[in-house]
Amino acid sequence: MLKSVLTGSRMTYSRLIGALFLSGFLLYGVGSSLVTSVVGAPDFLSTLSGHQTTLVLGAFLMLLNTAVDVGKGVLFFPILEKHGKRTALAYLAALIVEVVLLDVGVLALLMIVPLAQQGVDAGQASVGWAKALGSLAVQSNTMAYQIGQMSLGLGAVFLCLLLFRTRLIPRFLSIWGLVGYAILMAGTIAEIFGIHIGVMLSIPGGVFEVGLGFWLIIKGFQPEAYGQDS
């Protein structure tokens, strides 16, 4: 009976963390796609009035990812702490740095709304300034995103090393994550230096997060993560 209760508790906890991995991936991905559909258009400030709702909705979904990522780190902490307190702290700190930077980028994007209105209300002389600031806001979000992903990748590399050592998940998943996050960091560095290969290099890490999410929902962490023998 006790074993059944412990197993049920383990699976509930594992499924919650797995669901956070999947929901964070979905929220930020959909939000970013909505924002890009607006700011990726030529002269997007002049057409923003018809797409403002899309921009704000996308930004809101991206901000929701903050709660998801912080929740993921907090729930992960007691499991990781049993096997490596420094790694647990490093991963949580990396997630916090990541979400702060992502939020700074989203706030920069939201500044596009008043800039567009200013461009409509102001004279021709101010339109050029509004366009320049709008472009700067988009670039600021891009840079904040890349640095945030670099922070996530660094923390997640240590996470995957711990998962590999402790076998809390299958080792093939840990190796996949380790390689995927290392490639992700390489992609972010390339993007910062103007080499646009980051999207392609983010795929392995993204697939790992989706795979890990489904694994935790279906199988859960190994019982050793909770001090159980079986």
Image (cartoon, rainbow, N blue to C red):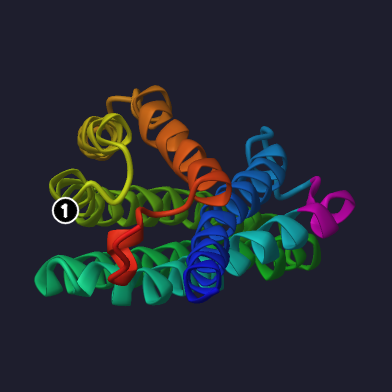
- Who's the residue at 41% across and 36% down the image? 208
Q: Is residue 108 visible?
A: no
Dividing the picture into quadrants, the one containing residue 70 is: bottom left
| Residue 50 forms part of the magenta stretch | yes
- Residue 33, given in percent of the width and then of the height, sits at 66, 41
**Amino acid type, callout 1:** Leu
- According to the picture, the residue beneath numbered tag 1 turns out to be 162
Residue 10 forms part of the magenta stretch: no
Magenta region, residue range = 47-54
Left or right for 171, reference 137 = left
Q: In the rendering, at what x and y percent does residue 221 appear? A: 39, 54
Q: Compare residues 91 and 50 and report the one nearer the observer.
A: 91
Helix, strand or loop at disc 1? helix
Q: In the displayed structure, would residue 74 be above or below residue 35?
A: below
Q: Give the position of the N terminus as an image quadrant.
A: bottom right
Position of residue 16 measured from the top left corner of the image (x, y, whole percent): 57, 64
The answer to whether 45 is drawn above or below residue 201 in the figure is below
Quadrant location of the C terminus in the rendered image: bottom left
Q: Residue at x 22, y 30 (%)?
A: 179
Q: Residue at x 32, y 67 (%)?
A: 228
**Relative side of 107 to 44, left or right:** left
Task: Check the image and name the residue furthest to the front.
Answer: 1
Q: Residue at x 64, y 54 (%)?
A: 27
Which picture quadrant has residue 170? top left
The crowd level at tag 1 (other Cα within 10 Å; few <14, some 14-19, many 20+) is: some
Q: Total of numbered circles in the picture? A: 1
